[in-house]
Amino acid sequence: MNRYYDELKWLYMELYQDQYAAFHDLCADLYTYFQMRDTDLKERDQERSADPQWYRGNDMLGMMLYVDAFAKNLNGVREKIPYFKSCGVNYLHLMPLLDSPAEKNDGGYAVSDFRRVKPELGTMEDLKRLARECHEQGISLCLDFVMNHTSEEHEWAKRAKAGEREYQNRYFFFDNYDIPAQLERTVPQVFPTTAPGNFTWNTDTGKVVMTTFYPYQWDLNYANPTVFREMVGNMLYLVNQGIDIIRLDAVPYIWKQLGTNCRNLPQVHNIVRMMRIICDVVCPGVLLLGEVVMEPDKVAPYFGTVEKPECHMLYNVTTMASLWHTVATKDVRLLRRQMDIMHALPKEYVFQNYLRCHDDLGWGLDYDFLRKFGMEEVPHKKFLNDFFTGKFEGSFARGELYNDSEELGDTRLCGTTASLCGVEMAAEECADDTIDDALDQAIRYDLTLHAFMLAQSGIPVIYSGDEIGEVNDYSYHDDPKKQDDSRYLHRGAFHWDLEAARHREGTVQQRIFDGLRKMEQIRGSYDVFRSSADVRTADTWEDSVLCIIRSGAGQKLVTLYNFSDQERTAWIHEDDGMYIDLLSGCRMEAKDVRLPSFGCRWLLKGEYDKQRREL
């Protein structure tokens, strides 16, 4: 606290001028939460403080899941810890599990109580026990922290509805539409189709309330120091249950200012920096993961600076979107450009990499670059959505649209990895328990996409079910509570009967699971996969083949990915001498390398024999 006190006070006063009593109350809270922190968590903090690079290596592997879909409740998840160990997972992201209304909950992102678990999932004590047993097995827990808003059923919102001015001041209430109308001119809409506008009329108060996301999610007013103090308290309460990573949900939106777009304002960075300081003071073993679904130039600032860091990790949203663009177009030029941008960033930046997640897939691509190749934004988005919903001739993908808005051209997409890369369609066309050429190719593509993710610097995170090739779950269409939200297409229940099939040789589940485990083990065995490696792309003289080269620790790794449904040659000419393909075990030169359709290679040169383990 002595180290950070002056900076914390300076940042606080910049937002909350002359609020000295409130600042001292905040500092007193921090000490209280530090005292409440369990001894084993403080020991964990000390160990991680002694090794601040603990999460930056090549041995981290994450998995994200919904508790109810995966194992019904928290105790069910705890019983599945051996499964996580068999997957090699040491970082478990539990999707929203805090109390929220049965309806109008946005998948758990409309929180009604930040200190209570949904009753159907268990209790806070169950969460604490899960965290403790995960820690014993070397697994860190991540939890979503919804910063921007609460549910309209939160205690604060209820008291605001009852007319208590103190609680109305924790939100954005307006007596009429005058100021909201001014804000609407400059603030974009998040869900223009399903939740148009940024404000909702509240009949209980006869006032207008700001609701950036959905009408039942009321935006919090962080210009009120009480909101900041209470939300910090909620965060520290959760980390004291054993949570290791706090995912800051929708963090770019948390500061509102008239005349702006209310996105990424300087005050947001003040708040995130203060939260980083608070974690370093109270719980230095805890990481902040920023969810910043923005264009690349807006994302990197959330790392802060080397001297004044903000988030420890950020989502790699743009690479994920660029990858699926490449799947549809079979053209790697945009993806290569995105990789070059990523590789130019400081190596200290840690990104969380993924193929799919709980959310929809948006097409926030670099259209200034794509226009050079005749790809205009609105028609290109339509092509991508047509391709991934199977409407485009020759498409192998199965997905559904989300927030369909043909007029605005920003319709987004839903679907699992396996369904979007062709496994679902190919499996349907096969006889039971057989794998024909089309399904074999689709499985290979699934593994190639995962190989691309695993070979990036940062932390790879698998969406639960992808490890066994789960396809879309269309049953949500028959559920009145879910049928209006197509994101449930990829939020279906985990199929434990299919998981059992991974033990049967030759099944889709076995091939995907074992293929992934092999690549994950390779990644953890070679230092060239560490974030400290030098990374660059190289010309392949083939628009459907991407080459990324990693160098470090006396090793050189040439990775190649073919996004074509035909065999292709990577016309590369790397160093003389033999390489070993870590995926096949074959030795070859890194020259004019042939790749099967939708295939990949990891070619290693260096002291691999000294480091190679039994995989």
Image (cartoon, rainbow, N blue to C red):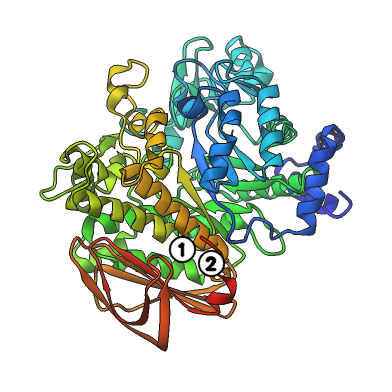
How dense is the environment of label 1, judged by Cα within 10 Å: few (below 14), some, or many (20 and up)?
A: many
Q: At which x and y percent is residue 460?
A: 50, 53
Secondary element at tag 1: loop
Q: Are marks 2 and 1 in contact (CB under 8 Å)?
A: yes
Specify whether residue 256 is in view.
no
Taking 376 as reference, is 288 left or right?
right
Residue at 42% in and 80% down: 579
Identified by mark 2, the residue type is Phe
Residue 189 - label: none
Does 182 sit above or below residue 47?
above
Taking 77 as reference, is 562 left or right?
left
Specify whether residue 504 is in view.
yes
Q: At which x and y percent is residue 93?
A: 56, 39
Q: Residue furthest bottom?
A: 576
Q: CA distance from mark 2 to mark 1?
A: 7 Å
Which residue is the site of mark 1?
A: 455
Q: Earlier in the sequence, mark 2 or mark 1?
A: 1
Q: Quadrant of residue 586?
A: bottom left
Does 509 sit above or below residue 535?
above
Does 389 sit above or below residue 100?
below
Q: At which x and y percent is residue 286?
A: 70, 45
Residue at 36% in and 81% down: 590
Which residue is the site of mark 2?
A: 529
